[in-house]
Image (spheres, coloured by chain):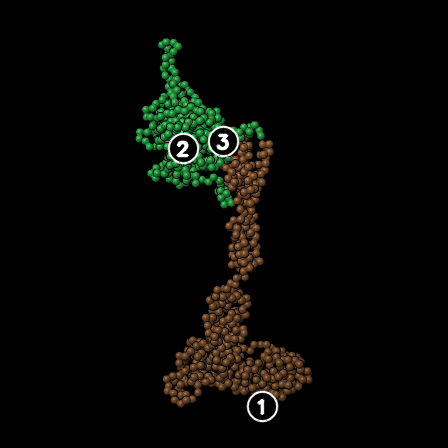
């Protein structure tokens, strides 16, 4: 076994082990939410950012905080309010007195909360578009510019933004172009009865479980690098492309629901996010290659915030998840003859 | 080692891929065979429907191998690529596209860090192929058509040939094509028939042309009923020409002439023939009378001919007058011929054959028509066989005949002397012999008689043509006269080849036959008598068997005697003046015959 092959296998094994430990660490604090955890981890490993939508009190902040603690990464929380300024997010230069010489003053950078590694941008839709754009720019560039000086943010830089779906009055929903920057959109469901019971047990007593650090920053970066090395077969890439094409209402392969309910389909970023998330999914399962199942698994999270409904879709209250479900049913993974042979023999 | 693993994985994959492709090809071949055999069955059934024999239909079995071949070719052209085979194997093994990714990396040759691990995973998956055996079945449900189609094919090939029943055709619409119709030749020959009447000449020419055209159409094929109709039309036209003498306005002239001839007892039969417009029989009768033994009879006949010709001319029947004048001209030559034959015959009596003697007796007795041509030839032959001594003896005999028989007329005596003188020399004998032979060959018929014989032949020929085409020609009246005819032709013509009478119509469903109760007759022909106008002012000619002599002025409404077996004299006359068509008078009159 060559050195490169051995290292990759070892890396793969480490990744699988890290995944297990990380999940265990998260599961020690969070009750349920396994799919949410999976999707967040995909996003983290795929070097993306995640948009989380859920009602208040479902553990979004706890998830991010626990994730940051498990990874020994710096955590910061930004509570977006309508009066939040961009400088409140990215930081600003502050005039301070010089301690060495009396009367002398200088500007000192006062870094904003964005300079963390795991950022929780809470209720991002409450902030003004200007403030939103400051965050979104940092998400895209992994750097901020303050007073003309560019400051690169520490890697890994991972943003978990939340949107409150209840209080929409006086909010500034993110425009579609900005939504596209998030790799995934995760829907946090309400806990089940058992999960809720468990939550009550854990949170209403004296004991507070503290998450332990299982991965270091370098390991996270290694996982990110490893994710990019996961092999993808051409049929899988083609399948992802077909899925994205099928969300375009002008495409011939688009199912009827897309043609009726969708105004704009997912673009190139949607396909890219699916592949990256699929790679992360395969990596976390200990595989060196992406399967059709990976793509199908990540497709809803990758595409739901990228599809723009038409008037008919909104009037019919068709959700993007319904559309994505029908698209997944309509687009075959394999060519017709092969699919038939696999099914019937 | 990684390279070896990769080779091993690749080799393993290729082995399984080959198996998959062969299976798919075999399945395609079976599918092609099933489809082609079904097509072959349909084609075989179609061929049977079209009337092809089974030896041709067997060839459609080649559809099976052809279908298999085409399917194999199609399967080869559309064979699965390595990626497709890998997809299939991954789907069957649920190996999360490990094999597909490995095949893709192998194909591109990309140097991916994950390559080795992917190859390993693919190899692990491929090892399970033998254990799991992907569910690629060869036989599909539609392959069951193969044995069914094969059985159906054998059944269609062994089907017996269809017997096509031609749809029934309307009677007479079947096409007939006759290369040679002998009967029409006689009609076509009418074109060369000489006749003094230009209008008749034109009509005969037209009839000949129509016959010629009909012959051409028959040779090419025409409908039977149309052919029969045309033949019947020609026959009517010829019959009209045959009976044209003394018709219409000239009927009075004919009757006058007939009456004048009937005044001479020897010419009564000739008069009747003339009244029947049977010029052939009239000619024969005149020939017989010309050969009558008694000079008195001959003179009376000669005079009657002259008178009848004049009276016919005066009565406005020039054609009748012409015929009588023709007869008058022939009368003398016939008289002379008969005389020669009689004299010679008497002299050469012991040299003649029994048939010649029979003819000589007929000539001498004046009863029946002697065949003068036959007699002439027999006499010429006998004369030719004479030795010199016999010739001398014959000359003496003739001289004695001339002098010895007081009944011989002076003219005959001179004639006998002349003959005797001729026989005195060899040259004279040869001349006599030559004259006799010329007499045998020369036609002794009047122009009108010859014309009518041609028309008779033509009409007879048309009748034969009609019989040949399956028609039933109307019987002609024979030369002996209609009164003695027994309707012979109709029975013969109505019989088919087996001799049994034919049914009237194909629609008849009865079991009877159409033989009738009348016995067959032996007559050779019958002739129809065309209707003519009755001239109440002229005396009725002839004697009709079964009917009494009619009288002028009598009507049909005469009270009968009331006695069975007796008829009033006026009752017979009523038939003559009635509106009954002439051809039926014979039959009607018999009801009133005593």
| Relative vertical location of residue A177 with respect to residue B435 in this rendering, above or below | above
- Using residue A312 as the reference point, say whether residue B368 is left or right of it: right
Chain-order first, disc 3 or disc 2: 3
For the point 41% across and 28% down, the residue is A209
Q: Is residue B397 visible?
A: yes
Tell me the residue that label 2 is attached to: A31
Q: Position of residue B472 (x, y in %)?
A: 49, 73
Question: Which chain contains the residue that carries disc 2?
Answer: A
Question: Which chain contains the residue that carries disc 3?
Answer: A
Q: Position of residue A167 (x, y in %)?
A: 32, 31
- Which chain is drawn using brown? B
Please, what secondary structure does the residue beneath circle 2 have?
loop
Task: Answer with the quarter of the image where residue B442 lies.
Answer: bottom right
Kindly identify which numbered label has been placed on residue A250. none
- Distance between mark 1 and mark 3 Cα atoms: 170 Å
Tell me the residue that label 3 is attached to: A16
- Which chain is drawn using green? A
For the point 39% across and 81% down, the residue is B578
- Distance between mark 3 and mark 2 Cα atoms: 22 Å
Mark 3 surroundings within 10 Å by alpha-carbon count, few (fewer than 14), some (14 through 19), many (20 or more): some
Labels 1, 3: one chain: no
Please, what secondary structure does the residue beneath circle 3 have?
helix
Q: Position of residue B335 (x, y in %)?
A: 55, 82
Mark 1 surroundings within 10 Å by alpha-carbon count, few (fewer than 14), some (14 through 19), many (20 or more): few
- Using residue B459 as the reference point, say whether residue B416 is left or right of it: right
Tell me the residue that label 1 is attached to: B406
């Amino acid at each position: 076994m060559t050195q490169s092959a051995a290292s990759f296998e070892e890396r793969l094994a480490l990744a699988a082990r890290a995944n297990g430990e990380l999940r265990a660490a998260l599961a020690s604090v969070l009750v349920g939410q396994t799919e949410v955890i999976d999707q967040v981890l995909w996003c983290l490993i795929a070097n993306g950012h995640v948009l989380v939508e859920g009602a208040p009190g479902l553990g979004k902040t706890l998830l991010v905080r626990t994730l940051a603690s498990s990874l020994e990464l710096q955590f910061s929380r930004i509570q977006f309010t309508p009066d939040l300024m961009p400088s409140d997010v990215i930081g600003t230069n502050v005039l301070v007195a010089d301690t060495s010489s009396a009367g002398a003053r200088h500007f000192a950078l006062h870094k904003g909360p964005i300079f963390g590694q795991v950022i929780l941008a809470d209720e991002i839709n409450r902030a003004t578009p200007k403030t939103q754009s400051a965050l979104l720019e940092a998400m895209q560039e992994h750097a901020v510019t303050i007073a003309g000086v560019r400051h690169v943010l520490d890697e890994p830089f991972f943003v978990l933004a939340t949107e409150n779906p209840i209080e929409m009055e006086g909010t500034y929903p993110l425009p579609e172009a900005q939504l596209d920057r998030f790799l995934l959109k995760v829907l946090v469901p309400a806990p089940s009865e058992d999960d809720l019971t468990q939550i009550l047990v854990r949170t209403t007593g004296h004991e507070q479980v503290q998450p332990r650090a299982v991965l270091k920053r370098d390991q996270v970066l290694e996982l990110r690098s490893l994710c990019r090395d996961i092999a993808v077969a051409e049929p899988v890439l083609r399948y992802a492309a077909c899925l994205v094409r099928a969300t375009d209402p002008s495409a011939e392969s688009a199912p009827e629901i897309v043609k009726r309910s969708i105004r704009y389909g997912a673009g190139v970023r949607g396909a890219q996010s699916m592949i990256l998330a699929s790679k992360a999914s395969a990596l976390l399962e200990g595989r060196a290659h992406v399967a059709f199942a990976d793509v199908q698994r990540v497709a809803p999270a990758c595409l739901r915030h990228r599809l723009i409904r038409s008037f008919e879709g909104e009037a019919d209250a068709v959700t993007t998840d319904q559309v994505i479900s029908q698209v997944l049913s309509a687009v075959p993974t394999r060519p017709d003859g092969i699919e038939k042979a696999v099914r019937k023999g | 080692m990684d390279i070896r693993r990769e080779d091993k994985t690749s080799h393993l994959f290729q082995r399984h891929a080959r198996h998959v492709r062969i299976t798919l090809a075999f399945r395609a071949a079976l599918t092609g065979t099933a489809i082609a055999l079904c097509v072959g069955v349909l084609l075989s059934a179609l061929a049977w429907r079209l009337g092809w024999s089974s030896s041709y239909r067997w060839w459609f079995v080649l559809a099976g191998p052809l279908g298999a071949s085409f399917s194999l070719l199609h399967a080869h052209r559309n064979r699965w690529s390595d990626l497709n085979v890998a997809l299939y194997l991954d789907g069957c093994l649920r190996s999360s596209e490990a094999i597909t990714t490995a095949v893709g990396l192998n194909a591109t040759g990309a140097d991916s860090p994950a390559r080795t691990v992917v190859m390993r995973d693919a190899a692990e998956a491929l090892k399970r192929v033998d254990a799991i055996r992907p569910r690629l079945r060869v036989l599909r449900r539609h392959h069951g058509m193969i044995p069914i189609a094969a059985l159906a094919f054998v059944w269609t090939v062994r089907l017996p040939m269809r017997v096509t029943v031609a749809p029934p055709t309307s009677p007479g619409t079947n096409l007939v094509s006759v290369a040679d119709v002998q009967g029409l030749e006689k009609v076509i020959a009418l074109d060369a028939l000489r006749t003094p009447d230009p209008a008749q000449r034109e009509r005969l020419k037209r009839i000949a042309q129509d016959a010629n055209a009909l012959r051409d159409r028959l040779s090419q094929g025409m409908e039977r009923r149309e052919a029969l109709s045309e033949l019947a039309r020609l026959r009517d036209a010829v019959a009209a020409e045959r009976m044209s003498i003394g018709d219409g306005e000239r009927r009075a002239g004919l009757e006058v002439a007939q009456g004048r001839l009937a005044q001479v007892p020897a010419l009564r039969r000739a008069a009747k023939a003339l009244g029947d417009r049977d010029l052939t029989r009239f000619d024969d009768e005149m020939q017989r009378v010309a050969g009558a033994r008694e000079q008195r009879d001959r003179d009376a006949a000669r005079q009657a001919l002259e008178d009848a010709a004049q009276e016919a001319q005066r009565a406005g029947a020039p054609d009748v007058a012409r015929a009588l004048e023709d007869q008058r001209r022939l009368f003398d030559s016939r008289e002379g011929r008969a005389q020669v034959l009689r004299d010679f015959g008497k002299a050469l009596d012991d040299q003649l054959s029994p048939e010649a003697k029979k003819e000589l007796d007929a000539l001498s007795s004046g009863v029946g028509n002697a065949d003068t041509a036959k007699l002439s030839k027999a006499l010429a032959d006998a004369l030719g066989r004479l030795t010199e001594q016999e010739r001398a003896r014959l000359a003496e005999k003739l001289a004695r005949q001339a002098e010895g028989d007081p009944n011989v007329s002076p003219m005959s005596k001179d004639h006998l002397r002349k003959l005797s003188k001729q026989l005195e020399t060899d040259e004279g004998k040869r001349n006599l012999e030559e004259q006799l032979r010329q007499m045998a060959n020369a036609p002794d018929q009047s122009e009108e008689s010859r014309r009518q014989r041609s028309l008779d032949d033509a009409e007879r020929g048309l009748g034969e043509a009609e019989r040949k085409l399956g028609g039933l020609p109307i019987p002609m009246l024979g030369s002996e006269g209609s009164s003695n005819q027994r309707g012979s032709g109709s029975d013969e013509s109505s019989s088919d080849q087996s001799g049994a009478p034919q049914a009237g119509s194909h629609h008849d469903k009865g079991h009877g036959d159409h033989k009738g109760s009348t016995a067959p007759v032996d007559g050779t022909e019958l002739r129809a008598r065309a209707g003519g106008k009755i001239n109440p002012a002229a005396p009725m000619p002839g004697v009709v068997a079964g009917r009494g002599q009619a009288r002028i002025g009598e009507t049909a409404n005469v009270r009968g005697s009331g006695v069975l077996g007796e008829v009033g004299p006026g009752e017979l006359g009523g038939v003559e003046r009635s509106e009954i068509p002439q051809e039926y008078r014979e039959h009607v009159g018999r009801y009133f015959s005593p």
